[in-house]
Image (cartoon, rainbow, N blue to C red):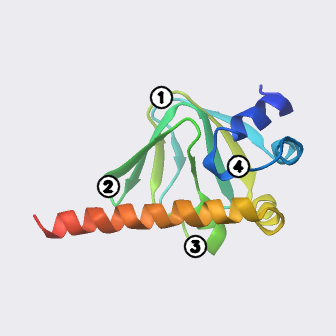
């Protein structure tokens, strides 16, 4: 079980929280629930309603949409932000490809952080923008085949 300090240190490895003070990270850490998943376990299922953001502490996951692997994520990455921002169903399955430790944050807590910490809100926008660009590039590559 991770202590609050260990959770806060894990957050420092997440792009969203790079510019957040240690004091604020310590507060955010108190909002996080640690979860463990064995290799092969579905962490989230495409189509389910999502009310949590997941931050990978250790391990790796495949992101699978429509039966196709679209991404691989590991330590310091996060997923689930799209579903808790727009209250739409999950857009992909996320499957543990190794034993996995994640920190889970409830939607209400994430929304509170977004309104109080503009660096986090800007970070979410940057990550979503990058993901859209990557998807556009993949789509272009697919149509050029």
- Mark toward the start of the polypeptide (4 vs 3): 4
Q: How many other residues sit within 10 Å of disc 4, few (<14), some (14-19) or many (≥20)?
A: many
Looking at the image, do the residues carrying marks 3 and 1 touch, with CB atoms under 8 Å apart? no
Q: Quadrant of the C terminus?
A: bottom left
Residue 92 spot, x, y in % from top left:
45, 58
Whole-number angstrom distance, CA of label 1 to CA of label 4: 25 Å
Describe the element under mark 3 as helix, strand or loop.
Answer: loop
Question: On the rendered structure, is 27 left or right of 53?
Answer: right
Looking at the image, do the residues carrying marks 1 and 4 touch, with CB atoms under 8 Å apart? no
Whole-number angstrom distance, CA of label 3 to CA of label 1: 28 Å
- Residue depicted at 52% across the width and 64% down the height: 128
Q: In the rendered structure, find residue 17 and report the number of the disc placed on it.
A: 4
Looking at the image, do the residues carrying marks 2 and 4 touch, with CB atoms under 8 Å apart? no
Which residue corresponds to mark 1? 98
Q: Quadrant of residue 113?
A: bottom right
Whole-number angstrom distance, CA of label 3 to CA of label 2: 19 Å
Residue 64 spot, x, y in % from top left:
39, 52
Query: Which of the pair 84/118 is nearer the observer?
Result: 118
- Residue depicted at 46% across the width and 53% down the height: 93
């Amino acid at each position: 079980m991770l202590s609050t300090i260990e959770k806060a240190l894990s957050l420092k490895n997440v792009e969203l929280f790079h510019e957040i003070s240690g004091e604020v990270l310590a507060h955010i850490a108190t909002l996080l629930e640690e979860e463990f998943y064995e290799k092969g376990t579905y962490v989230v299922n495409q189509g389910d309603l999502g009310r949590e953001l997941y931050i990978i502490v250790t391990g790796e996951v495949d992101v699978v949409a429509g039966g196709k692997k679209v991404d691989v994520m590991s330590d310091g990455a996060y997923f689930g932000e799209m579903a808790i921002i727009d209250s739409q169903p999950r857009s992909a399955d996320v499957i543990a490809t190794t034993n996995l430790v994640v920190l889970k944050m409830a939607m209400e807590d994430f929304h509170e952080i977004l309104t109080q910490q503009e660096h986090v809100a800007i970070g979410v926008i940057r990550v979503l923008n990058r993901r859209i660009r990557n998807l556009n590039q993949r789509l272009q590559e697919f149509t050029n085949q």
